[in-house]
Amino acid sequence: MGHVLGRLDHHAEIDMVEEKAKPLPRLTPDNRIFWESARQHKLMLPYCLHCERPYWPPGPVCPYCFGEELTWKEASGRGTVSSWVVVYKAWLPAFAADIPYNAVQVHLEEGVCLTGNVVGIPNEALRVGLPVQVVFDDVTPEAALTRFRPR
Ligand SMILES: [Zn+2]
C-alpha cells in the first residue's frame, strides 16, 4: 500500500513540474502582429478598413460591418480599468506563487477592451475607472506580455 501511495506521489510531483511553466501567447495568423509588436514594446490594434473602427480580439472579419480588410495601427496604451478581480486560488499550479493576483479588463482610449493585470499597486487599490497605461513584461526572450500600471 505504501508503495502504491509512493508511486502516486511521484506522479503528482512530475505533473506539478510539467505544469510549472506559465502559458505563453499562442501565435495565430490573426494575432501574430499583436504579439510580435508587443515584443518590440508596441501596442498595435486591428482596424477595419471599411468602417475604420478598431476591434478586439483580432480576427479575419470586422465584428461591426463584416469587412474583411484590416490594417494595424499603434495604440496609445492609455485606458481605464473597467472590471477587475483578485484571484486567491491557484487554478493553475504555475500561478500558485503569484496568488493573490489581479486580472483586469481595461477599456482603451481607442474603444476596445484588453484583459491583463495591473502591476505596481496593491490589489486593494484597484477600482473601476483607475487610469492605466500599458507596460510590456519581457517574460521570455521571445515573448512580452501586455500589462498595465497606474498613470
Ligand atoms: Zn468594419
Image (tube, helix red, strand yellow):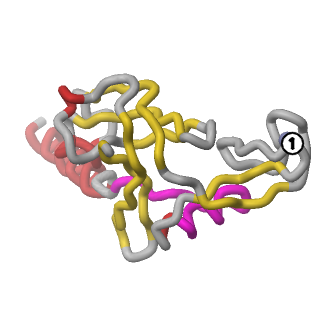
Q: Give x and y (percent) for residue 131.
A: 38, 37
Specify the quadrant that holds the N terminus. top left
Q: Is residue 27 magenta?
A: yes
Q: Is mark 1 within 8 Å of ligand 1?
A: yes
| Residue placed most toward the observer, 120 or 96 | 120
Left or right? Give the position of 102 relative to 55. Answer: left
Specify the quadrant that holds the C terminus. top left
Q: Give x and y (percent) for residue 102.
A: 30, 34
| Residue placed most toward the observer, 101 or 131 | 131
Which residue is tagged 1? Answer: 51
The structure residue drawn at horizontal position 33% and vertical position 51%, both measured from the top left corner, is 19
Left or right? Give the position of 89 relative to 23. Answer: left
Q: Which residues are magenta?
A: 22-37
The structure residue drawn at horizontal position 47% and vertical position 40%, both measured from the top left corner, is 79
The structure residue drawn at horizontal position 66% and vertical position 42%, both measured from the top left corner, is 56
Magenta span: chief secondary structure: loop
The structure residue drawn at horizontal position 35% and vertical position 42%, both measured from the top left corner, is 117
Within 10 angstroms of label 1, few (less than 14), some, or many (20 or more) residues?
few
The image quadrant where one finds ligand 1 is top right
Q: Give x and y (percent) for residue 132.
A: 38, 42
| Residue placed most toward the observer, 97 or 123 | 123
The outermost residue toward the bottom is 141
Left or right? Give the position of 92 relative to 75. Answer: left
- Under mark 1, the amino acid is Cys
Q: Is residue 7 magenta?
A: no
Q: SS of the residue at dot 1?
A: loop
Name the image quarter holding residue 3.
top left
| Residue placed most toward the observer, 94 or 55 | 55
- Is 136 drawn above or below residue 118 in the view shown? below
Name the image quarter holding residue 129.
top left
